[in-house]
């Protein structure tokens, strides 16, 4: 079967899934082979993915231990490794322990060896030469192979003194295992208190704390303030739930139990758990893997089932909804409203309607983001005429942009005719829709985002209150629909809205304003009637009058 690295591989004849991974050239002398191959012992793809993640973590940890060289074990690590030997013996025989006499005989040896080890005996020649007494050498001959197998499995390289400590600890662990299996053979399967004495086997080396992991992720990725505010509390809750301090100890099982805990009671939407909780963990752990801090991303394979929401209406505004909102933009604002917020009500819906931009791409616009360019059009008598056109720059420099990409979007002539350019020039080079001096100083939610939220509430108050339509994002969907109906070029339509191109070739070169303006011009004008007021006590605008523009 072909060698593929990132997922379980199905054997073409047996149907059994395998873990397969090439060994890096630098590790081949240490690993002793060029490929790791482990049967996952299942034909079920979902079970295979879960087992693959466990095996992958074990393989990566073994490679890391091999590269680390000889290590000195702490007392806790010695007994944690002995616990692995205890559990392996139980797993191998617990289901069918057979005749209890077998375990009685094993216990007799264990008890005899323990009694002799406790006696104070003068060192013999073997002890002086090898560091092992005769009884210790006897124990090593009986259980040493299990210790060597464990060291090979984990990739740990330890010195003679630690090897001796581990063999003796393994002897005590096997005594406890044999006692438990003897009880199992007699039908007693009650929990074994001796099992609780073994500490969990943790990765060898310096612990990786959450603070170290999080600070590294945010610094290298230049994570936005809003993402930090949203993700950090969620991830800290995950760490508390897992109950570990070393991030290398977080496993897929931890995250599955965390997911199930969040889903309990139905108080939180599955889509939130998927797109916020699990997605944040996957992003941070994935980065840690790319930096060599972790060997496997434990969030891979942790799925959250989200029922597909029934589509009961278009995602974009209807003709009636669009007209209702645009009509309301002409209403005289309250005297208590700030100049900037009044301007936001007046212009932001129109800009979203004619550009398909995200509302927060518009609310953060500055005066200096307006630009001019020249288009050549056919004038009277068929002669070419140079015409001045305008556009806006949507740039991360003004504030966070979802794609983090700069783009230039031409303005529809109807916006210019309504006086938008004059309005921008009257504002200077600063923000158009909020006061820089009154801007919120908190780093949690930028002021331009708050402007968008206020506009959304205003749109709802007008009567666009269908929960199946977003009060601001509805323009973005509508623009795409109108663009298709108007025959806009699909690649240019995506470029106007800042959507990813549909093929690799679309990412080459640029879409300058001169190339996009003819597409913008294909968008039909909104012919709406203005209103004199939007009475907050009513759900819909009143007193319609003809709009001068």
Image (spheres, grey):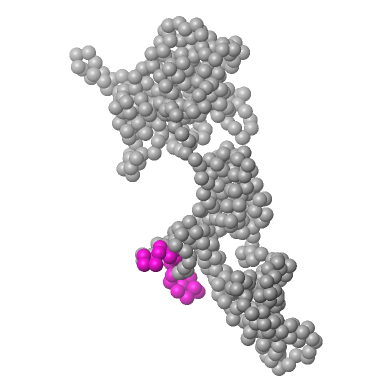
- Res. 267 image quadrant: top right
Q: Whole-percent x and y of residue 486?
A: 31, 24
Q: Foreground residue, 144 or 442?
A: 144
Q: Residue furthest bottom?
A: 125
Q: Which residue: 37% across, 21% down?
A: 412
Q: Whole-percent x and y of residue 152?
A: 55, 75
**300 lies above or below 547:** below
Q: Whole-percent x and y of residue 257?
A: 61, 52
Q: Residue furthest left?
A: 381
Q: Residue furthest front?
A: 187
Which quarter of the image is occupied by the N terminus?
bottom left
The answer to whether residue 172 of the structure is visible from this angle is yes
The magenta-colored residue range is: 10-36
The answer to whether residue 423 of the structure is visible from this angle is no
For this view, does 120 lie left or right of residue 205? right
For this view, does 148 lie left or right of residue 473? right
């Amino acid at each position: 079967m072909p060698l593929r690295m990132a997922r379980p591989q199905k054997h073409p004849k047996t149907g059994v899934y395998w873990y397969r991974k090439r060994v890096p050239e630098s590790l081949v002398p240490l690993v002793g082979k060029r490929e790791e191959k482990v049967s996952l012992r299942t034909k079920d793809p979902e079970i295979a993915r879960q087992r693959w993640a466990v095996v992958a973590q074990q393989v990566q940890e073994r490679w890391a231990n091999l590269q680390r060289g000889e290590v000195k074990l702490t007392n806790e690590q010695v007994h944690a490794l002995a616990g692995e030997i205890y559990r392996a013996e139980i797993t191998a025989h617990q289901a069918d322990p057979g005749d209890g006499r077998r375990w009685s005989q094993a216990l007799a040896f264990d008890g005899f060896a323990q009694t002799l080890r406790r006696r104070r005996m003068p060192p013999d020649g073997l002890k002086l030469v090898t560091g092992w007494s005769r009884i210790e050498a006897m124990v090593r001959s009986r259980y040493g192979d299990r210790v060597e197998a464990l060291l090979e499995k984990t990739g740990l390289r330890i010195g003679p003194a630690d090897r001796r400590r581990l063999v003796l600890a393994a002897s005590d662990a096997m005594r406890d295992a044999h006692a438990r299996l003897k009880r199992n053979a007699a039908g007693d399967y009650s929990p074994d208190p001796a099992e609780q004495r073994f500490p969990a086997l943790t990765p060898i080396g310096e612990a990786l704390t959450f603070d170290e992991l999080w600070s590294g992720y945010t610094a290298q990725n230049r994570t936005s303030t809003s993402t930090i505010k949203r993700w950090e509390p969620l991830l800290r809750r995950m760490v508390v739930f897992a109950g570990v301090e070393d991030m290398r100890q977080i496993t897929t099982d931890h995250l599955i139990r965390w997911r199930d805990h969040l889903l309990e009671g139905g108080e939180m939407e599955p889509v939130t758990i998927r797109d916020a909780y699990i997605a944040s963990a996957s992003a941070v752990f994935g980065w840690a893997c790319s930096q060599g801090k972790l060997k496997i991303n434990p969030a891979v394979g942790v799925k959250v089932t989200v029922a597909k929401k029934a589509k009961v209406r278009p995602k974009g505004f209807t003709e009636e909804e669009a007209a209702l909102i645009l009509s309301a933009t002409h209403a005289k604002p309250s005297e208590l409203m700030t100049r900037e917020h009044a301007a936001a009500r007046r212009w932001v819906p129109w800009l979203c309607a004619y550009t398909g931009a995200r509302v927060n791409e518009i609310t953060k616009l500055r005066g200096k983001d307006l630009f001019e360019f020249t288009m050549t059009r056919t004038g009277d008598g068929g002669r070419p005429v140079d015409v001045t056109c305008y556009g806006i720059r949507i740039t991360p420099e003004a504030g966070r942009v979802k794609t983090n990409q700069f783009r230039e979007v031409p303005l529809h002539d109807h916006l210019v005719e309504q006086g938008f350019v004059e309005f921008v020039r009257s504002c200077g080079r600063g923000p158009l829709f909020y006061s820089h001096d009154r801007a919120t100083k908190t780093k949690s939610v930028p002021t331009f985002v708050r402007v968008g939220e206020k506009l959304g509430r205003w749109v709802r108050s007008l009567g666009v209150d269908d929960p199946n339509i977003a009060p601001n994002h509805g323009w973005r969907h509508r623009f795409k629909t109108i663009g298709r109906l108007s025959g806009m070029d699909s690649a240019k339509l995506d470029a106007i809205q800042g959507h990813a191109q549909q093929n690799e070739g679309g990412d080459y070169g640029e879409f300058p304003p001169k190339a996009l303006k003819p597409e913008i011009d294909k968008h039909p004008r909104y012919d709406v009637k203005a209103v004199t007021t939007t009475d907050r006590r009513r759900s819909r605008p009143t007193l319609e009058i003809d709009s001068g523009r």
